[in-house]
Image: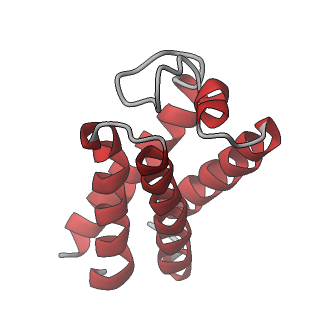
């Protein structure tokens, strides 16, 4: 079980870092509305641009903490729960703008993984 939790930590941590650091200015089929970038996505949700940067810093920091938790287990639950809260917000934003449910799939998948990491680990 321990190796499965570590695998989930790696998948979630690297995926969040990929989205927020490497893919932030690239269009994907998962972006809210017709947004092409993360900043545009936050605007589609009716959120201020500064909130995009706050959420970005939090997600990157928590993703790094989730990866560090492989070696420092006391970080695992707080990092996973912090990401779970932010991912819940992502799902709510997709629902707010009436996106097709499929656009929420990555956030729902990573939310589920974070909850498993937090409570089954």
Viewer-proximal residue among 42 and 18? 42
Query: Which quadrant is home to the C terminus?
Result: bottom left
How are the colours assigned in the image?
secondary structure
Query: Which quadrant is home to the N terminus?
Result: bottom left
Residue 49 in the image: state x and y as whole percent: 78, 36
Q: Is residue 35 left or right of residue 70?
A: right
**Residue lying furthest left in this view?**
1
Viewer-proximal residue among 118 and 56? 56
- Residue displayed at 51% across by 49% down: 93
Image position of 22 with respect to 116: above or below: above
Viewer-proximal residue among 30 and 13? 30
- Residue displayed at 72% across by 48% down: 57
- Residue displayed at 50% across by 33% down: 19
Task: Give the image quarter of residue 43.
Answer: top right
- Residue displayed at 39% across by 78% down: 118
Task: Give the image quarter of residue 70.
Answer: bottom left
Residue 97 in the image: state x and y as whole percent: 47, 41
Image position of 84 with respect to 118: above or below: above
**Residue lying furthest right in this view?**
50
Residue 81 in the image: state x and y as whole percent: 49, 74
């Amino acid at each position: 079980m321990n190796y499965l939790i570590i695998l989930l930590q790696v998948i979630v941590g690297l995926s969040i870092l990929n989205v927020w650091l490497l893919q932030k200015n690239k269009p994907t089929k998962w972006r809210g509305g017709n947004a092409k970038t993360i900043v545009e996505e936050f605007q589609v949700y009716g959120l201020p641009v500064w909130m995009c940067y706050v959420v970005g810093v939090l997600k990157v920091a928590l993703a790094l903490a989730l990866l560090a938790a492989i070696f420092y287990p006391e970080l695992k639950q707080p990092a996973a729960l912090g990401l779970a809260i932010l991912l819940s917000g992502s799902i709510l934003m997709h629902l707010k703008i009436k996106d097709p449910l499929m656009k929420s799939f990555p956030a729902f998948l990573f939310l589920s993984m974070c909850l498993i990491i937090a409570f089954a680990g």
